[in-house]
Image: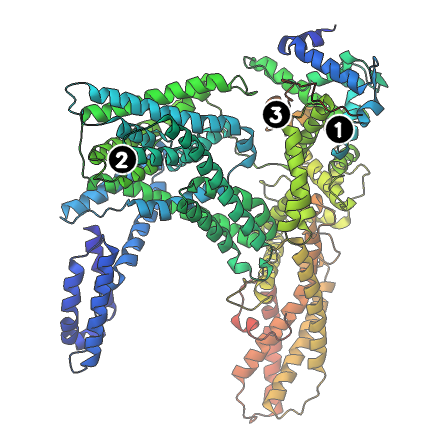
Amino acid sequence: MSSRTNRWRKTVSLEQINNLNKRFRQLSSNKETLSREDLASIPDLDNNPIRLQIINAFFDKRNLSQSEVGIVQEIGFEEFLMVLTHFQPAAMDITEDNREKLRRTKLRFLFNMHDTDGNGIITLEEYRQAVEELLSKAGTIAPETVKAIADAAMLDVASTTRGKMEPDEFYEGITFEHFLQILKTLDIETTMHVRFLNLDTANMRCGK
Amino acid sequence: MLVGATSHSPTGSRGFMERGFLLLVVLMFLEGTVFPLGAASSPDISAPDGAGGHERNDDHRGIDNYTFPKKAFPVLSLDYGHIQMPFEISLWVLLASLMKLGFHLIPRLSGIVPESCLLIVVGLLVGGLIKLAGEEVPPVLDSKLFFLCLLPPIILDAGYFLPIRPFMENIGTILMFAVIGTLWNAFFVGGLLFAVCQIEGTHLSQVELLPCLLFGSIISAVDPVAVLAVFEEIHINELLHILVFGESLLNDAVTVVLYHLFEEYSGAGEVTLMDAFLGVICFLIVSLGGVAVGAIYGILAAFTSRFTSHTRVIEPLFVFVYSYMAYLSAEMFHLSGIMALIACGAVTRPYVEANISHKSHTTIKYFLKMWSSVSETLIFIFLGVATVAGPHAWNWTFVSVTVILCLVSRVIGVVGLTFIINKFRIVKLTTKDQFIVAYGGLRGAIAFSLGYLLDKDHFPMRTMFLTAIITEIFFTVFVQGMTIKPLVDLLAVKKKQEAKRSINEEIHTQFLDHLLTGIEDICGHYGHHHWKDKLNRFNKKYIKKCLIAGERYKEPQLIAFYHKMEFKQAIELVESGGGVKMPAAMPLQVSMQNIQPKKQPPMAADRALPQFTKNREEEIRKILRSNLQKTRQRLRSYNRHTLVADPYEDGWSEYMLKKQRMIELEKKMTQMSNYLTVPAAPSDSPTMRRARLASGCDFKAENKGAKVSSDPNAFYTIKAPPGNVPTIQVELASPQSPDSVNLVDEFSKKGGSSQKNTDDRKEEQGRMMKPPSAGKGGKGEEEEEEEEGENKNPGLLRCLSDPGPSNEDEEDEPFLP
């Protein structure tokens, strides 16, 4: 097991891992690996506007290992857990350093979800795409509105991170550092977590 | 004395103002005033029925005077009793407001001492003055007055602006503190007090257990008014604020139940296990019932606001009245009125906000803030006055034990409860947090009013209780309230970040919500994100559809947020004066072309923009401002039931409508000028001459306009190609924002309106300058016309650049909708 899974183990009991394992097998219909279709068939996800992005995140190599870029077709249980580690709550006695690290990993996960082509920059096109996805379940919305919102957000980023720009300068997109900067008021280390406690597999409704 | 002294002042000022009359009628006047003066100099401050009695007497006298006209008829008479009640209420409110005003003029003082302390001191002084004057101190903090008038505005304000998200995220912790913590405090304080009272030598052995517990339940509840007053000044982080404040709101149900139970039982004497069980049931009914009553009224209010689009002026009233009704209805059944108000405010807000106009929303905001701050000020002043009013029964043991026990029980309660709560919390409460929560447990006027409500016959120790309650309030408000700010600084407790939410945060908050819901679904774990999502969808699908008018219910939160933001920017744009110079506060220093993937060659006008001189900028700004103001004034004539339309008022839909109107207006304008030029008039009749004059001017104005716009250096040519000067800023936010179009539109309209202005002005001048007799020859007339033609030039310029609306402009606009 990788060091990451070991870290995971420290805060999550073996029982919880077992529960997640059961869930994994449920989703993958008892196979060793999980495919996109398995995740896509979870009925609860149907109403989620960012469903595709969530599923993609599970198969994104950047979330599985630090260096590579690309997409895998199937993931094993360990990879499944590794994606879920991003949703661990912060420990109570966390040091400032670790808190900052945690914050960076969590935000990196979010950043990767937006940065679909993996070039380290969220471009305007990608941002527009993200906003469009976000609003996709909200009924009919004029594409201009979506564009306007993404543009306004982008402008906001550009002006907060770059300050005044000359007319012929060009802001190519949000880098990760800028991403950190604009979301510094969002207490990501405390908000981005899911309770894995008390997983009740007996009552878990299977996606099939 | 203050009241008595001021009551004479109106006579003085009035007499001063009408001295001329007074000299003539002074004898009659004196005769007329002697009797009412006598009545007023012994003001019966306390009893409203007394005032009523005066009134009746006065009426009789009035009739007497009327039926015997031979008797000196008082032209000016003094009748204080008639206005006593409202006059004194206004005086109190005025005093409160002035005090609030005064404290903020002394910045150093308000930095050290919280306002609540200062207000109590003012109350003490006022009470002392009244006492010194030998008057009886009025029982100002009467329980009825407090619970029915002073408390509801504060609670409604708190409920309406309750930050729902953090509140719901911490609801478990808040409930724990509010219910278990308050129960613990009540029993701990009550029980130990009883134990202390049993010690020989304290002379308190007559105090029984149940009154002690009753006292404990009164004193144990954290007071929302005091907490708000202090916590708003220390700017503590949102989590701690919502914990303490939420506790102070929700513990009301516990207090109400305990109060009524103990009051009931201390009459009966016996308490059985059954009673305790009934108490629990009672608690559930009181709290949930209160919430239910509030929610029902809240939904009613939201539903009503669906139909108010035609009578915008009374919109805000519905929120206030329905909430007050909720409070009263809950109180009627002895349910928790505070919880009803909170529920009502929290339920109403999202739906009402979607329905009502922007102006009404601002009105609601201001009214709530105004009422609550006045109430708060009055409450603290009254606390001071009531302290002076007494009666007091000071018992060292009882008072000091109370203060100590309150502190101890609070600390034990908070530490013990956080120990349990932290097992379930993700964001644990640190020791610092616990300290602030414990230390922030201020007591306030609710406890006093509850103590005041006690029956003297049932509770012979009522005065001693009241004294102890007041001491405890003073202790918490003064000692804890004053030291909490330095302590917060000392401990480096996280403060609140004062930043407005940016659109990126909004996007990512929502993104995160969906992401977490998705992850929970993938893990097959139905956590609270899952249920929140379900609830949101239910809300969107059914409730919003019923409660929100028109199509707006479909609007997702993000778009609503975006519109709000755009709207705010538009207002800032107007306020900053036309958008040439961007205020530093606005984050729009970058234009669309900076982020557009395909670089477009910047337009020539954009380039030209920075070359403007200061003067020109000023001119453009003035023009924009004046135009906006003019449209505001012009669109609707005054009507008692509608507000004057504001271009930025009711969202974009109305905006577009208005734009349409303006286009029509323009059309009509051109038609009209055509019409005016058509009749070729015989020069003799004055009216015709006037018409001709007007048309002539009109023609000239048109000419002038054409000339000016052809001038390449004139400042409004820059306007002519759409999307230049004022658009820049807005275009950033959204390329097709109606705002930009509108400004241009208005600008083009300006040509028309200024023409019309000139028309009117000419007409007016013509009317005044020319006598109706056509005595002068045609030559003189022509001369005058020429003169006017010369005058016209600056006049036109003034019309363009000066916002100053001439009154005659607004009078005759037959073609305006």
Amino acid on which disc 1 is placed:
His
- Residue B557 visible? The answer is no
Amino acid on which disc 3 is placed:
Thr
**How packed is label 3: few (under 14 Cα within 10 Å), some, or many (20 or more)?**
some
Q: Does B743 sit above or below residue B212?
A: below
Q: Does B647 sit above or below residue B688?
A: above
Under circle 3, the secondary element is: helix
**Which of the two marks, 2 or 1, is nearer to us in this view?**
2
Give the CA separation, mark 2 to mark 1. 68 Å
Residue at (40% x, 31% y) in the render? B279
Give left or right: position of B742 versus B55: right
Residue at (30% x, 44% y) in the render? B143
Q: Residue under circle 1?
A: A114
Q: Residue under circle 3?
A: A191
Residue at (63% x, 33% y) in the render? B532
Q: Residue under circle 2?
A: B267
Could you tell me residue A200's position as x and y percent?
67, 19
Residue at (58% x, 52% y) in the render? B303
